[in-house]
Amino acid sequence: MISKEEIDKIMQTEGQVKGVVFQTDREYVKNHFGYEKLKLVEQKLADWGHPLVYDKIQALEWLPAGMRALSLLAVKEALELKDEDIRNMGAQAPKFSFIIRTLLGFFMSIEKIVKTSPEVWQRHWTAGQIVPEQINEKSITLRIENLNLHPLFCKYEEGYFERIMQFVKPESKVREVKCAFKGDPYHEYEVSWK
Amino acid sequence: MTEPELELFELENYIKDIWRFLPVPILYLNPLGMIIDAGEMASALFNLPKEEIIGTRLRNYFDSPEAIVSQEQESEKAGMALSREAVLKRGAPVSISILARKDEAGELIGFFVSLTDLTDIKTFQRHLEEKNKQLETFNAVAVGREIKMIALEKEVNGLLVELGREAKYG
């Protein structure tokens, strides 16, 4: 159970995130657990003092960056999920988001991903930045700098990046190899494929 | 939202409504042949929820994946490749049309694919072919019988005339 102090700290994160990411949370909960469970998630957020009505969120509106983590934490707690379930939620997100699927048209190769993902990140976030780097012909790293929301968000992003990469390399696997919550200066995800 | 964002929002809703409405199975693929979007009727054709279709390769649903790859390549060269027949792994025959999308620089950015389930049409076609075969057989028998009747009437007339009587059949 998250404490009020943790919630306050998360909400102090500077920056904003596009509403589309919350729409994917909504679609995931509705599709996997039903509309009534979405109401439980909303109640959890209201109890925490940061209410959100998912049906009213517009894809292009900006919300506080901290709400990204709170939405995931509310889903996890209200529905009694495990971290792996949240990772799976990240993996499902591209399937539910019209905007993300449209942007996937730009990701036709690893080179394009390396070249365009910073710009794509900026379409969704005013906080942090993503720094991709091609390591060799079978792996790249994705580094997220200056955005430390919550370890649960790290798990979500792991699943999310894996799914995105699988649109280009179906056998891609992603794991977080560096984490700011473990003392590293940033979050780094290693993407590899056969 | 700013005015451009509002316009984008309305455009997104417009496109979403079109995808929901499409009465024919339609898919959108990335240049690698991966399904990026699917209309509701595509779900019904593949018998899978849309979210399970997205992220899979179109060719994997067919008996002959290489034919699908070939059609994708053809549409990339010619702009589109229309009305090719193929068979889904579950046995349903379909007609596939593919349109290649390119950007201003002429680079391939995706494919629109429409699928038409030909199961009912093929069943009806087989039924018509069967009926036609039966009619041809009946016709052959009927014509043969008629020819035989004419020959018999001629023979009878001949015999009657030999007996000094009048021909009976005109």
Image (tube, coloured by chain):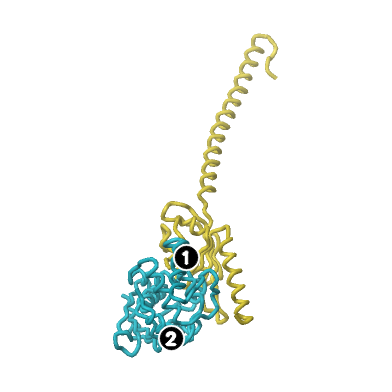
Q: Amino acid at mark 2?
A: Thr
The C terminus of chain A lies in which quarter of the figure? Answer: bottom left
The N terminus of chain A lies in which quarter of the figure? Answer: bottom left
Q: Is residue B97 left or right of residue A117?
A: right
Question: What residue is shown at x 43% (from left), y 87% (from top)?
Answer: A129
Q: Is residue B21 left or right of residue A154?
A: right
Where on the picture, by quarter, is residue B66?
Answer: bottom left
Tag 2 or tag 1, which sits nearer the N-term? 2
Q: Nearer the viewer, residue A63 or B154?
A: A63
> Which one of the lettered chains is coloured cyan?
A
Q: Secondary structure at mark 2?
A: loop
Q: Which mark is residue A13?
A: 2
x and y, in percent, of residue A89 in the image: 40, 70
Number of labelled discs? Answer: 2
x and y, in percent, of residue B34 in the image: 44, 69
Q: Is residue B19 above or below residue A113?
A: above
Q: Nearer the viewer, residue A99 or B55?
A: A99
How crowded pointer 2 is (Cα within 10 Å; few <14, some 14-19, many 20+) is rated as some
* Figure colour of chain B: yellow
User: Which residue corresponds to mark 1?
Assistant: A39
